[in-house]
Amino acid sequence: MTGGSSTLDNPNMDHIVERLRTFPTPLMTAFSDSLHALEATDDNDLMIHWAEEGIRIAQLSSRSWEVAVEYFRATPSIIGHIGEPHLQRWIDCGTELNEESPVMAAAFFRASPSVIPRISPRQMSLWASLGKGLSQGTWKSSTLATRFFDSSPELSEHLSFREIDLLVS
């Protein structure tokens, strides 16, 4: 933002900060740290949308605030790779995973900064679907899907997306 003022001092952010204060402290910390990194975009509408989506994620279930922490942490690293047009798709992927398991969704967001630069924006949804497909509604399959996302940075470093798809299949 221009003039050295912080986005947190922006009146448009007041309601967001108030809502974030109702969650555990790590959520506000992750938001603040990421907000400062995103200020370089100088796009207030994007930042408001990003913050509101984080709050929406945090409200989905009792453990979703942990998912929102990972969402806020990951955004500064991935926004340059996927750009604004694909940001909502990434958010939607994590939100859908959250419906299945907050732990799985947190792993998806946590792995995103390492995986997203190695895959195309189209493959982003497919990557999320691969993990979701491993989860069959049991704690064991949910754990497997979470481990898939946790291992995805290493997998994507050594395998093509097609090879990862074949491995999961």
Image (tube, rainbow, N blue to C red):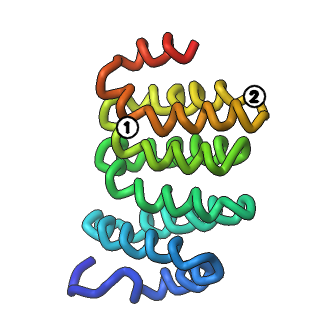
Counting from the top left corner in percent of width and height, residue 52 is at 57, 67
Quarter occupied by residue 111: top left
Which residue appears farthest toward the right when viewing the image?
137
Contact? badges 1 and 2 (CB < 8 Å): no
Q: In this view, does 11 lie above or below 91?
A: below
Q: In this view, does 25 lie above or below 104?
A: below
- Would residue 163 appear left or right of 167 to someone viewing this image? left
Mark pair 1, 2: CA separation: 25 Å
Q: Is residue 150 above or below residue 159?
A: below
Counting from the top left corner in percent of width and height, residue 113 is at 36, 45
Tag shown at residue 136: 2
* Amino acid identity at mark 2: Gln
Quarter occupied by residue 33: bottom left
Counting from the top left corner in percent of width and height, residue 21 is at 59, 83
Q: Image point 50% across, 14% down: which residue?
A: 167
Q: Image point 40% across, 49% down: which residue?
A: 84
* Amino acid identity at mark 1: Ile
Mark found first going from the N terminus, 1 or 2: 1
Mark 1 surroundings: few (<14), some (14-19) or many (≥20) residues within 10 A: many
Disc 2 is placed on an element classified as: loop
Q: Image point 32% across, 52% down: which residue?
A: 77
Which residue appears farthest toward the left when viewing the image?
3
Quarter occupied by residue 96: top right
Mark 2 surroundings: few (<14), some (14-19) or many (≥20) residues within 10 A: few
Counting from the top left corner in percent of width and height, residue 41 is at 29, 63
Q: Mark 1 points at which residue?
A: 116
